[in-house]
Amino acid sequence: MPELPEVETTVRGLARFLDGARITRVALNRPDLRRPFPPELVQVLTGAEVTGLSRRAKYGLIHTDREQTIVFHLGMSGRWRIDPGEPDKHDHLVIETADHRFALCDPRRFGSVDLVPTGELDAWAPFAAMGPEPLGPGLGAAQLKVALKGRSQAIKLCLLDQRIVAGLGNIYVCEALWRAGIHPRKPGGKVTRPQLERLVPAIREVLEQSIRDGGSTLRDFAQPDGELGYFATRFDVYGREGEACRHADGGVIRRIAQGGRSSWFCPNCQR
DNA sequence: GTTTGCACCTGAAGGC
DNA sequence: TGCCTTCAGGTGCAAA
């Protein structure tokens, strides 16, 4: 599923072809994804020059010289296809430049595309409420301690809350908690300072490792029909129910449900 | 204010 | 083979 590392590699991949290019054509193949496409999207983007790309949490940002930024979210199943050979029935938004065609393909349509004035991005509602970037200087054990103070909600669910940390999803929260040795059901407010001191670098490590893995597959995206959005990563706990813990402590990975979704953890080394 | 539960959506996988 | 059910999960909203 597209989480922060996938969005990061997607943005980097798009930037190689889109940064500095002029958009010659924009086509919408349906009126909406999670929510309706902005009605002015086609008009604003047609003829605009892309001035840069960036990422905020799990959102990709395509900046233009029209002082408007395309903000896209890949949801559960979204990906960008570059110069796709054949149209896909789930290509909902297509952007063309003189040299390339970019199709936003999202079968489950949990994604979104918004148009936000570039100067107002920080105040845009989804961004204004967000916590610090996990790879930025804003995330730290002291900051987390304050954000989690008094929270009875399980740490797993706290970390999925974008107001506490922006950009973490189910997969990487499971992986980070395993690395830090924290039980996913432990109340957020009861996670100790030493555990938070382990958790912060664990979060950074799993994300950076995945970005590196994605970066290695990024080379393939230069080929025709390149697709951006997914890459294979070796997970330590995610999806490994019943398998041995990679800490070789004799533990067996268990799966539990939290907040309607699965958590994987080792009952031996996560306390 | 915090926490929980659900809807949204489609494809894959498993059971019968 | 075909049909049905379940699961996957990010986000936003309503309800408790």
Image (tube, coloured by chain):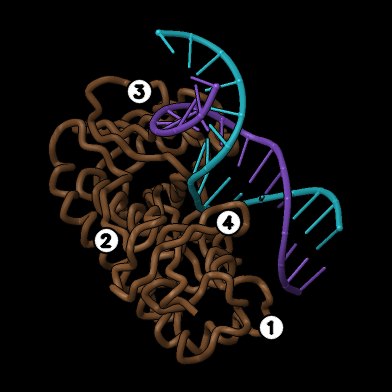
Chain colours: A brown, B purple, C cyan
Chain under numbered label 3: A
* Callout 3 secondary element: loop
- Which is nearer the N-term, disc 1 or disc 2? 1
Q: Nearer the viewer, mark 4 or mark 3?
A: 4
Q: Mark 3 and mark 1: span between their CA atoms?
A: 48 Å
Q: Label 4 belongs to which residue?
A: A257
Q: What is the three-letter code of the residue carrying label 1?
A: Gly
Visible in this render: residue A135?
no
Mark 1 highlights which residue? A150
- Give SS at disc 1: loop
Chain letter of mark 2 equals A
Which mark is first along the chain, 3 or 4? 3
Q: CA distance from mark 4 to mark 3?
A: 34 Å
Residue A120 x %, y %:
54, 60
What is the C-alpha distance between the residues marked 1 and 4? 23 Å
Q: Characterize the local packing of mark 2: few (<14), some (14-19) or many (20 or more) Cα atoms within 10 angstroms.
A: many
